[in-house]
Image (cartoon, grey):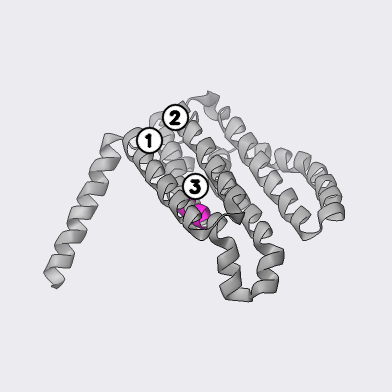
């Protein structure tokens, strides 16, 4: 829902600014990636860390025992797929839908082959692995292809943004690896990882103008709350 809402707002802006205002498109592109990242990463981190407990409360011990790893793998896949919506819609908005279409045609036989092998060997876990591997690969290729839209002038993410994307994905994978540890260990990990992510996002990814807008929104919210009291 979150990536869909962001992409729905970005698509007409990409279509209007692509090729004419490369600077504006570049800002929209990176801002869309950052917005989805900051919205999805905390949710994905909590889901991968506590999927077992969540399934236990929701569906009972049998489902939790069989499906915890499936949910963790799918959470990472959804995270990667959400981020990929931005380059996908940039390519569409630039009038190059054939680029994504050809990519998906190439992916189809590869994905079906991978799914056949993994499902045959690992069942539902294999299905989750195949889908998440496809979404991660699809996202990486879409980010690469987006660099060639409009000569690559509007769609080249800064290295620091790419580094944080990779680190966030790695943090979720580490959360999966900690699945068998005590709950308090995972709580501590989530708190530390979220704090580090928040600090990095605030000081290294956000531009001064973006920080100013957030501070203004916080002040406005505080004033409204005080007025209600």
Q: Where is residue 72 in the image (x, y as percent from the top left)?
A: 62, 55
- Does residue 223 appear in this view? yes
User: x, y percentage for residue 6?
Assistant: 46, 52
First in sequence: mark 2 or mark 3?
3
Q: How much space separates mark 1 and mark 3, taking CA atoms?
A: 22 Å
- Residue lying at 44% horizontally and 52% vertically, measured from the top left: 188
Residue in the foreground of this view, choosing between 189 and 206? 189
| Label 2 sits on residue | 160
Residue under pointer 1? 205
Q: Where is residue 186 in the image (x, y as percent from the top left)?
A: 50, 54
Would residue 7 be found to the left or right of residue 224 on screen? Answer: right
Cα separation between marks 1 and 2: 7 Å
- 172 sits to left or right of 109: left
Classify mark 3: residues with Cα within 10 Å, few (<14), some (14-19) or many (20+).
some
If the image is split into quadrants, where does the C terminus sit? bottom left
Taking the magenta stretch, the answer to whether it contains residue 44 is yes
Q: Which mark is residue 147?
A: none
Q: Specify the principal SS of the magenta part.
A: helix
Which is nearer the eye, 7 or 192?
192
Q: In which quarter of the image is residue 13?
A: top left
The residue at the point 62 percent across, 36 percent down is: 140
User: Relative to residue 33, is residue 100 drawn left or right?
Assistant: right
- Residues drawn in magenta: 41-46
Name the secondary structure under disc 1.
Answer: helix
Residue picked out by circle 3 = 11
Foreground label between 2 and 3: 2
């Amino acid at each position: 829902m979150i990536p869909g809402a962001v992409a729905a707002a970005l698509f007409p802006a990409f279509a209007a600014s692509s090729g004419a205002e490369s600077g504006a498109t570049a800002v929209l592109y990176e801002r869309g990636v950052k917005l989805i990242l900051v919205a999805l990463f905390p949710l994905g981190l909590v889901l991968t860390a506590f999927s077992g407990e969540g399934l236990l409360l929701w569906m009972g011990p049998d489902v939790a025992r069989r499906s915890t790893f499936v949910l963790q793998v799918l959470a990472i896949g959804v995270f990667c797929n959400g981020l990929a919506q931005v380059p996908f819609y940039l390519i569409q908005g630039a009038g190059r839908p054939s680029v994504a279409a050809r990519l998906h045609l190439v992916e189809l036989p590869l994905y079906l082959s991978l799914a056949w092998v993994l499902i045959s060997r690992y069942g539902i876990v294999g299905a989750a692995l195949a889908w998440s591997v496809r979404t991660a690969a699809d996202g990486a290729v879409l980010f690469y292809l987006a660099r060639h839209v409009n000569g690559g002038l509007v769609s080249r993410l800064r290295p620091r943004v790419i580094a944080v994307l990779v680190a966030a994905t790695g943090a979720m994978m580490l959360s999966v690896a900690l699945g068998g540890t005590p709950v308090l260990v995972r709580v501590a990990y989530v708190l530390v990882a979220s704090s580090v992510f928040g600090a990095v996002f605030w000081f290294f990814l956000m531009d001064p103008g973006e920080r100013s807008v957030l501070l203004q929104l916080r002040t406005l919210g505080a004033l409204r709350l005080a007025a209600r009291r």
